[in-house]
Each structure stands twice: as structure tokens, then as C-alpha cells.
Image (spheres, rainbow, N blue to C red):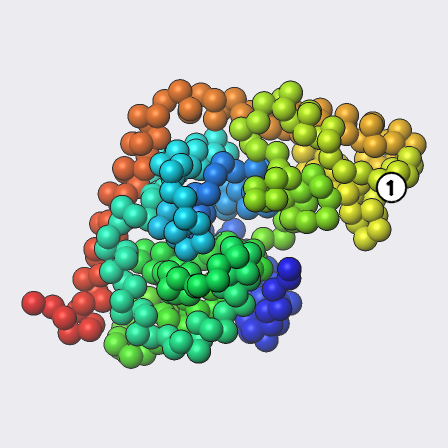
Amino acid sequence: MTTEYVDYGGSFEAALAKSRLLEQDLQKNPQNYKILTGDRPTGRLHIGHFFGSLQNRVRLHKLGVPTYIVIADYQVLTDRDTFDAIAENVHQLAIDYLAAGIDPTDGKTIIFPHSHVPELNQLLLPFLTLVTNAELDRNPTVKEEIIASGQKNINAGMYTYPVHQAADILFCKGNVVPVGKDQLPHLELTRTIARRFNSRFANDKPVFPEPQPLLSEAPIVLGLDGGQKMSKSRNNTIMLSADEDETARLIKRAKTDSERLITYDPENRPEVANLLMLISLSTGRKPEDIAAEIGDGGGGQLKKMLTESLNEYLRPHRAKRKELEKDPGYIRQVLKDGVAQARAEAEQTLNEVREVMNMML
Ligand code: TRP
């Protein structure tokens, strides 16, 4: 399903153009920005996350931009009713961030679970008064999520999703949010909420920034079944935590086509093109060149090459995550430190909010 979203500065192209300018300025003036980003802890990360968003976050983080990562545990409740594995999922997610190179010891980076920061959630009530039901009704990403989750009765947590996401972003005055296209409507509502809050309550000195989306230009990694996005619920992934043999087994089962000559043709041969793209992402080589090298070696040769290059590329990440898995106390400490800093900042923001709203005692 695609999102028909043409409402950010006029068009998706406009959003992309703005995003490119923002990217340039981030490189020049990293100190002017604070990145806020997050994931729902629905399981371990797979290579689609790795190439699609995680690597980009690490790159931005290494430019020296403060990076705040919210593990959106409460938000898992919006479309899933099982909570058995939540603690383990939070833990595993943190391991993948750290293994990929997010470094909370740099003094400006935190990782924290949403449910431990009550001050953040307090922003939800005033924010809810700044949006209309009609605006929530219109949000195309929420509509898609509802369809994808198969819910017949929509819970209000799902319905208000973009409002709590606004609280996640604004509590620490995050002003850059790296997102995929599907998250643009949420971000637009965050900007609206910030603007309305400022003009209603804080005319002379704005409390909240209007955060800008930073669109990732990383390619969307398709699942091993070819036609659709890689996603755990579609059972077509390679997890970052998979070992080398398992990776080889999964790739062996990947869908290709009956044409022996390997060519890079995303339009007509999406399955083969996706495997070539994964080799390209793992080696830095052009997919066309890789295809030419394999020539009439067929699907077998293609898969062999992918197995080798992907396993080699992921080896450092996998080694690091193994090491981290042996030290749960450290992971817990990283999360606790993240919570402490997030709470301190959220409290400060909440005080400013109370002040401009005339709610001080
Ligand atoms: N909605 C995001 C997702 O499902 C996760 C998320 C929660 C998030 N809060 C956020 C992303 C704040 C960016 C900023 O992927």
C-alpha cells in the first residue's frame, strides 16, 4: 500500500528538496540541531531496518548531532495485544542501536523507553486540545496502520497516535526527525501542534520548535519473497541477530526468476534486483556492475555472492551484538541513564509549559 501524501509544503518533491538543504546544514552546523527518532519495540531489527534507517542514524550521530532515541513501548499497544516479550524486545532493540555504532557515552546521546518518562506523557493532554477530530480522521498513515492491524474497533491510542508522537518529539525540543515517507503526515501534525501551542500560549517566546523531517534516501529493502517490503510480520526477513549459516539458508530460499542471465532491472525483475541491491549495499559496488560480473551464472551464483558479501558486511555488527548480549547489566544502565536525562529535560519543558499556560503554583 502506498501513502498518497501530498501535503508537505505542496508535494513530496518539495519535502525532499527541503530535506536535502537541511542535510547540508546539519553537516555544517551540527550544534544547532537535536535529532529525535524512535522505533516501536516489536522485535529484533532486520537488515531492512539496518540499511533503511539505522545506518543513516549512525551517520548523523557521527556528525556530532545530539541523538535522542525513544523506544516507543506504549505505542506497541496501539496495534498489538501481546505484551509478553516487550522487555526482551526493548533490550534487543537497544543492543542493535549500540552494536550499529550509536554511542551514548558521547554525552549527547540517549536511548530510553517511553513508559519510563511520565513527564513526557503529560504533554499529551494539552496537545490533544490543539487538534481536531477531523484532523485525526484525515491522517493517511493512521488509516493504513488500522487496515494493516486488522482492527475492527479502533482504540483511541491508535487514533491519537500522531499526538503522542508529537509529545515524543517536542518534550526535548527535537528539531530534526529522520523519517520515511509514511511518517510525514505525523510530522506535519507535530509541526501544527508546536505552532498552535506557541501562538495560543506563548506568543512572545515560543516554547517549541517546529521540527523538520529529514527524509532518508536509502532504498527500501524488499523481503526475500520479492514483491513487498521486508517486514517481520511478512516473514521475509534476515535478522541482524541471525548467524551466518542461517543467513545462507534464508538466502537460498529467496525468490528469483527463471532467467539465467542476471541483469539489474528493478521494474521487470524486482526479486533479482533486490538481491543485487543488497550486494551493492554490502560492498559499495554498483548493482549493474555486480550483475555484469555474475552474467549467466544465474540465481545460484547471485545468492552465493549475496551470502558472502552480506555475512562479511554484518560480521562486525554481529560480533558486537554478541558481546553486548553477554552484558545485560550494561544495557540496563544505558537505558536507565537515558531515562534520567529524558526525565530531567521533560520536566524542564513541562515547567515552561505550565508557566506559559498560567498553571504555576
Ligand atoms: N511511529 C514510529 C514507527 O512506528 C515510531 C516512533 C514513535 C517515532 N515515536 C516517534 C518515530 C518519534 C520518530 C519520532 O516507526
At 62% from the left and 68% from the top, the residue drawn is 4
* Quadrant in the picture for the C terminus: bottom left
Q: Is residue 241 left or right of residue 74?
A: right
The image shows residue 286 at horizontal and vertical percentages of: 77, 40
At 44% from the left and 78% from the top, the residue drawn is 134
Q: Is residue 271 left or right of residue 196?
A: right
The image shows residue 297 at horizontal and vertical percentages of: 89, 29
The image shows residue 263 at horizontal and vertical percentages of: 87, 41
At 73% from the left and 35% from the top, the residue drawn is 254
As drawn, 40 above or below 300: below
Say what secondary structure mark 1 lies in: loop
Outermost residue on the front side: it is 152
Question: Which image quadrant for residue 17?
Answer: bottom right
Task: Report whether residue 304 is seen.
Answer: yes
Comparing 35 with 111, the one in front is 111
As drawn, 310 above or below 61: above
At 41% from the left and 73% from the top, the residue drawn is 192
Q: Is residue 260 left or right of residue 309?
A: right
Q: Is residue 140 left or right of residue 296?
A: left
Question: Which image quadrant for residue 340?
Answer: top left
